[in-house]
Amino acid sequence: MTETEVLIIGGGPAGSTLARALRRAGKDVAVMDKAEFPRDKVCAGWVTPAVFEELEIDLEDYARGRVLQPIHGFRTGRIGQRQVQSDFSGEPASYGIRRFEFDHYLLQRSGAELLLGQALETMRRETGGWLVNDSVRARLVVGAGGHFCPVARFTGAKGPGETAVAAQEIEFEMNPQQRAECRVDGDVPELYFTTDLKGYGWVFRKGDYLNIGLGREDKHRLSAHVEAFRDYLAGIGRIPRDLPGKFKGHAYLLYPHACRPPVADGVVLIGDAAGLAYAQSGEGIRPAVESALLAAGVILGCGGDYSAQRLQPYTEALEARFGKRGTRAVETGRLASQARQLLAGWLLKSRWFSRNFLVSRWFLHQQDKPLPVPAAQAHGNHFY
Ligand SMILES: Cc1cc2nc3c(=O)[nH]c(=O)nc-3n(C[C@H](O)[C@H](O)[C@H](O)COP(=O)(O)OP(=O)(O)OC[C@H]3O[C@@H](n4cnc5c(N)ncnc54)[C@H](O)[C@@H]3O)c2cc1C
């Protein structure tokens, strides 16, 4: 029997960030993940600089033996149309990582007890906490298991009724011939919006690795969309014709569309388990990390009482950071979607719009300052 105060289900960026923040404040923490690490995660691996700052990652140290692709521009446009390039001089506007390496690095340094290769199967309430898989006792269980996190049902998540983004991706190390055929620049990823504007595809070269994918708000015939996109890219000579292996799929919820309550008695949801990805870009790593930092502050302030009432400030902290769900945020989402339909045709051809709105605001979120680093929480026990 493992006894711990906080059991985190899922060792992705959300889980490892929370584990590290709580361990630094002296809490007893275990992370359970169904996978052994390092493990692959279906993702383009595009990370904004705010994430590295919030995680206090020394870029030089990280880059030793791992892929860290600096990004100095983006090419954007609609499939079948001319692309517009937005350049960012000076410091990199973003980075490309491989989730296989990134998630392993974060989990290893978290300092938590690791229960890897173990899926959460059962979770029963007992006095003072939870009994998980009949083998782990914990006062608080944190759901950080991504979109399909089983802990989410304990806060009332509906599951099948939710509208999720469905996406498929392939990532592989290019051989010399594929490298020669690939015309995508490492520091300028390419984004291609679908003609109905219900999603976008990407091509992202990270060192010798190539990542290609496409996500849509409508999962109907997703594989056909992905296949057509792949053929289009090969046809215009951007990617090699022979791709090894198949595209892999996954899903996530956009923040305005998610309706999962983030807390219940003895339960907190963070990251994709709570449905936090940014509406415009689908970026989910930054919200996952930030939700973990916000949750850490609240958990530390609970003084060991993990009732829903004591955990409620986490819901408020999420709303303060990401907006209120179901009201203005959704309206803004609807307006944005109508505006997208009407204006996108010509806006996407505008260099000014592409750089200042599409890339800087909607994709890079440069208007949002990074959250303060977790060291402050260790001393202050406050939430942001
Ligand atoms: C195709 C695609 C491309 C994307 N590209 C980007 C991108 O470029 N940049 C970006 O910011 N975001 C991207 N996202 C979103 C991003 O991947 C997620 O938002 C992010 O991984 C969320 O982190 P997390 O820690 O909440 O969950 P995850 O990273 O999903 O981690 C969850 C962990 O929980 C474990 N787990 C699941 N179920 C159980 C269980 N029952 N028991 C135990 N463990 C369990 C899993 O093994 C996993 O390790 C992309 C998503 C997709 C689908």
Image (spheres, rainbow, N blue to C red):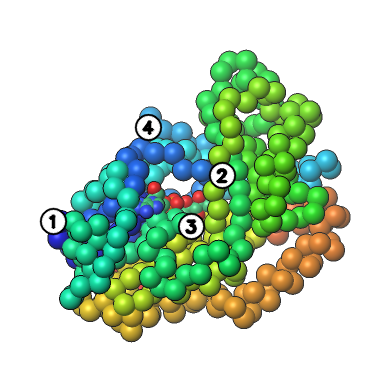
Is tag 2's residue or tag 1's residue first in the polypeptide sequence? 1
Label 4, label 3: how far apart the Cα atoms are: 31 Å
Q: Which residue is painted at 61% across and 48% down in the image?
A: 167
Query: Dot 2 corresponds to which residue?
Result: 249
Query: Dot 1 corresponds to which residue?
Result: 1
Side (left or right) of 280 relative to 321? right
Q: Which residue is painted at 59% across and 78% down in the image?
A: 326
Is tag 2's residue or tag 3's residue first in the polypeptide sequence? 3
Label 1, label 4: how far apart the Cα atoms are: 38 Å
Residue 147 — which label? 3
Query: Could you tell me if the residues under marks 4 and 3 are in contact, i.e. CB atoms within 8 Å?
Result: no
In this rendering, which labeled residue sits more in front, label 4 or label 3? Answer: 3
Beta carbon of the mark 2 residue lies under 8 A of ligand 1: yes
Query: Looking at the rendering, in which quadrant would you find the C terminus?
Result: bottom left
Side (left or right) of 202 relative to 100? right
Crowd tier of the residue under label 2, counting other residues whose Cα lies within 10 Å: few below 14, some 14–19, many 20 or above: some
